[in-house]
Amino acid sequence: MTLRERLDKLEPRERRLLTLLLGFLGVIVLLLVPIGLASIASGKRTENHEVRDLLQSIYEASGKVSERKAQKDALLARYARPAPPLAGFIEEAAKQQGLTAAESQDRPDVPHGKKYTERVTVVKMHRIGMLGLAKMLERIESSGHPVAVTKLNIKPRAGEPDSYEVELGVSAFDRKGDPQPASPAPAAPAATDEEEQEP
């Protein structure tokens, strides 16, 4: 029996119920399709936002990595120029300002980790003016060498304007070279058949 014949045998009340049921199902289908499409579109939109955010974070991280690399390269370039012997270095900076170092004393080197060593020299200077001292300190700090003023004691001289006794400590930081990779030991020559047969 065909579907048409089955429908013809239904009573009017059953046909109305079937029509209502089919109409209800049609409305549900019509509503579900746009809802499903909207849900898919929303999912794609969220995914696109996540990809965009990820790309943005990668871009920002790339900028930070480049900045850190530039800072590291600048630091290594500074350490590539080790400071000269500090006593002469300080004396030269003082002479350029018309000052003299009365005495200097080198302190023992101080290791900092495995790659750095600190050299310290302390100098004493008598009867120097504040302007000359300030210019000398500026010259030391801006020398381009890895040096720093790590100690500064200033005492005014009684009855003498702009005259000071100064104890100055300057540190130079030296970077040890990276260890060279060990060269492999030369391989022993292979024994010949004749050598193997000898007792």
Image: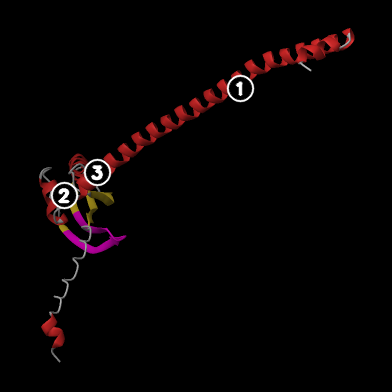
Mark before the other along the chain sequence, 1 or 3? 1
Examine the residues drawn in magenta and state their main secondary structure: strand
State how far apart marks 1 and 3 are (Cα): 50 Å
Mark before the other along the chain sequence, 3 or 2? 3
Residue under the image location 10 percent in, 47 percent down:
95
Residue 49 pos. (x, y %):
50, 26
Residue 41 pos. (x, y %):
56, 20
Which residue is at the front of the view, 179 or 28?
28
Which residue is at the front of the view, 75 or 105?
75
Residue 31 pos. (x, y %):
68, 15
Q: How crowded is mark 2: few (under 14 residues within 10 Å), some or many (20 or more)?
A: few
Image quadrant in which the N terminus is located: top right
Residue under the image location 77 percent in, 15 percent down:
3
In the rendered view, tell whether residue 125 sits above or below residue 194.
above
Picture quadrant where residue 142 is located: top left
Residue type (three-letter) at the residue carrying disc 3:
Asp
The residue at which mark 2 appears reads as 81
Task: Give SS at disc 1.
Answer: helix
In the rendered view, tell whether residue 136 sits above or below residue 150.
above
The residue at which mark 3 appears reads as 73
Residue 164 pos. (x, y %):
22, 48
Q: What span is colored magenta in the figure?
A: 104-124
Residue under the image location 20 percent in, 55 percent down:
124
Residue type (three-letter) at the residue carrying disc 2:
Arg
Image quadrant in which the C terminus is located: bottom left
Picture quadrant where residue 117 is located: bottom left
The residue at which mark 1 appears reads as 39
Task: Give SS at disc 2.
Answer: loop
